[in-house]
Image (cartoon, grey):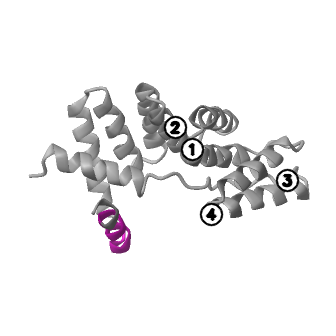
Amino acid sequence: MINLRSLIALAYTLMIGLAAPKTADVSPNFFSASIAIASFFEQGINATQAENFSVALQAFTQAINAKDHPTAAYANRCLVEIQLQQYEAAVSDCTIALNQSSKNPEAYLNRGLAEYRLGNYAAAIIDNTHLLQLQPNDLRAYANRGLAEAAINQHELAIADYTAALSQSSALEPTALADIYRKSA
C-alpha cells in the first residue's frame, strides 16, 4: 500500500515535472490578424520554448497590443508570467484568455498553478476542477488539485486526487515516467 508521504512526493513531482505549464495549443486567428500579430505570436512561442521568458513576455505583449487580441497570446503570456513568478499578472492574463474562450484547458491549468503559488488554494481547486470537466483524465489537474486540497487540510480529498493522478500515470510512456522518477531522485 502506498503511504501518504509517497503520494505527496509523487504529486509534487508531477506538479514540477508533468504539471509544468506548457504553451497553449490555441493558434492566433489568422483571418482577422495581421501578419505582424502572427510574427509577434510566433516569436513569443519560440522564445518560450527556448526558455527566454523576458523576450517571450515582450513578444506576447506586442501581439496583444495589436488590434486583434488573440486568446492564444494572453494564454501564453500567462505561462511566461508564471515562469517569471509574476503570479498576479498570470491570473489576470489567464482570466482574459478564459473570458475569450472558456474551453481552454491550459489556461485553467496555468491559472490554477498561479493561484496555488499565491496561496489561493480554493481558487486553484476550482480551476483544476474546471480542467477535469474538460479533460477528465488529466493527471496534472488531479495532482495540482490534490496539492491545493492538502494545503487546506482536506487530506482525504487530496489522497483521492493523488490516487487518481497515479492511476492516470499508467497511460504515460515509459520515458515520461522515467523523467518523473529522475526528477524526484
Which quadrant of the figure has residue 89?
top right
Real-space Cα separation, disc 4 to disc 1, in angstroms: 14 Å
The image position of residue 65, as x and y in percent, is 85, 41
Q: Earlier in the sequence, mark 4 or mark 3?
A: 3
Q: Residue 49 got which mark?
A: 4
Residue 185 position (above or below residue 109): below
Q: Residue 37 got which mark?
A: 3
Three-letter amino acid code at the position of disc 3: Ile
Contact (Cβ within 8 Å) of mark 1 with mark 3: no
Three-letter amino acid code at the position of disc 2: Ala
Which quadrant of the figure has residue 145?
top left
Contact (Cβ within 8 Å) of mark 2 with mark 3: no
Q: Earlier in the sequence, mark 2 or mark 4?
A: 4
Magenta region: 172-181
Three-letter amino acid code at the position of disc 4: Gln
Whether residue 65 is visible:
yes
Indicate whether residue 173 is drawn in magenta: yes
Three-letter amino acid code at the position of disc 1: Ile
Q: Which residue is mark 1?
A: 82
Real-space Cα separation, disc 2 to disc 4, in angstroms: 19 Å
Q: Nearer the viewer, mark 4 or mark 3?
A: 4
Q: Which residue is mark 2?
A: 114
